[in-house]
Amino acid sequence: MQQDMIVVIDLGSERTTTLARDLRALGVYSEIHPHDLTADALAALPNVRGFVLALGPNRAYEGQILEPSEAILGAGVPLLSVDDDADGAPDLRTFALTTCKAQPNWSVENFIADQVELVRRQVGDKKVLLALSGGVDSSVVAALLIRAIGPQLTCVHVNHGLLRKGEPEQVVQVFGKELKANLIYVDATDRFLDKLAGVADPEAKRKTIGAEFIRVFEEEARKLDGIAFLAQGTIYPDIIESGTKTAKTVKSHHNVGGLPPDLRFELVEPLKMLFKDEVRACGVALGLPENMVYRQPFPGPGLGVRCLGAITRDRLEALRASDAILREEFDRAGLRGKVWQYFTIVPDVRSVGVRDGARAFEWPCIIRAVNTVDAMTATVERLPWDLMERLTGRITHEVPGINRVLFDLTPKPVGTIEWE
Ligand code: XMP
């Protein structure tokens, strides 16, 4: 059942990811491995039909020219050298399909079938725990594990009170009700907001949220008996190091941040070989709702980094309500799939306005809508004027505490995407 594979070997190229993605686009499964791949590591890779030797500007490393290992050269399958400096695109199609005779059998359906098998083999009759945030990656992991080992999986959804409107409800509906997962829903809103009271520094806020999240999750984990595995939504970009300077393509480990030693479970990471678009396709194939799978990126600390300064409940509610209106209006304007990320921000300053003939001393709401490829740089979406007017009208009339709407036109750099 396992698919054929072409292995991309990192010899200092800056295009290893592109090569692997291009091979997968041909329907041939591909992974990236370091130049010093050992015979044992190679033996663990099923159905290797060929190697693409990805040469590039970082091939000289610490005074040595990187060479492919004996295991690679002696594997007895075709090799194709691709140099970043060479003109023209390599003919991966001819190499993969004709020279290597690799079967183009890489598909999401085959991937799911394989992973279901592999997870069942790894887990046996033991129990698995998953922190289900409701984000794309953890949701797809949950759906896959429900299919593979349903009753052996327990999902914990910690609502830290900083989620968008409707998100915790959707997690409960989709996973608890429709997919019938063992779902533990923890409403820790009060606990988080109490901890965050008066914490104004952005880094301190992030640390408080992160540490409290681990604590709540840990408490839930301790209440459960016989958990042997922890599932994680690790995806391929998480384990491919950015850049190739060290020529160590794959990070040696990625552990579960913050859990105490007596809660170190073995990991189950069924998506760790997938790129983000493949994760989404997998989610759709597993029957998850489209708005869950194609959701825009949302930071771990959630609305906490958009409720600037020390978070207060009333301002947080104003933020959540304005974000919901923004999403609704973007949907209506057909911008949902077009704009990469859009959200509102509510700072802790107030300005004078007038409402119903009386002085209104209220907060502004800032709207930010940006496009980017990799989140390292970003440009601002040019919104239609009538949409901006409608947003302004709705937010100032429907959201208690907001008397102005501002639009952030700052690209990254110099602004970051988030304000904190
Ligand atoms: P910045 O603000 O650094 O954001 O330009 C780049 C992208 O990263 C997201 N972001 C985060 N994601 N945890 C996350 O999971 C975080 O702490 C975090 N901070 C920023 C941000 O939403 C944007 O997409």
Image: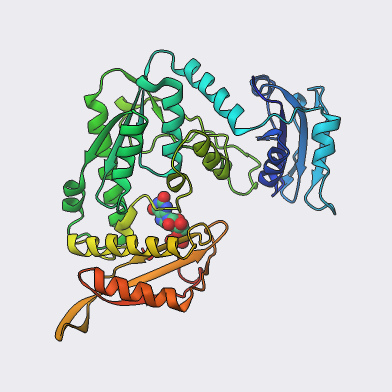
Residue at 66% x, 44% y is 17
Q: Considering only vertical position in the picture, is 333 above or below 247? A: below
Q: Quadrant of the N terminus?
A: top right
Q: Considering only vertical position in the picture, is 280 above or below 208? A: above
Q: Quadrant of the C terminus?
A: bottom left
Task: Tell me: 302 left or right of 197.
Answer: right
Going by the picture, which residue comes out furthest to the top? 125
Nearer the observer, 377 or 60: 377
Please provide percent x and percent y for residue 404. 29, 78
Please provide percent x and percent y for residue 411. 50, 71
Residue at 26% x, 50% y is 208
Q: Where ligand 1 lies, by quadrant?
A: bottom left
Q: How is the image coloured?
A: rainbow
Dividing the picture into quadrants, the one containing residue 342 is bottom left
Going by the picture, which residue comes out furthest to the bottom? 357
Task: Tell me: 135 left or right of 314.
Answer: right
Going by the picture, which residue comes out furthest to the left? 358
Please provide percent x and percent y for residue 349. 24, 75
The answer to whether any part of residue 186 appears in the image is: yes
Please provide percent x and percent y for residue 109. 59, 30
Residue at 63% x, 39% y is 249
Residue at 57% x, 40% y is 278
Task: Tell me: 364 left or right of 47.
Answer: left
Q: Considering only vertical position in the picture, is 404 above or below 267? A: below
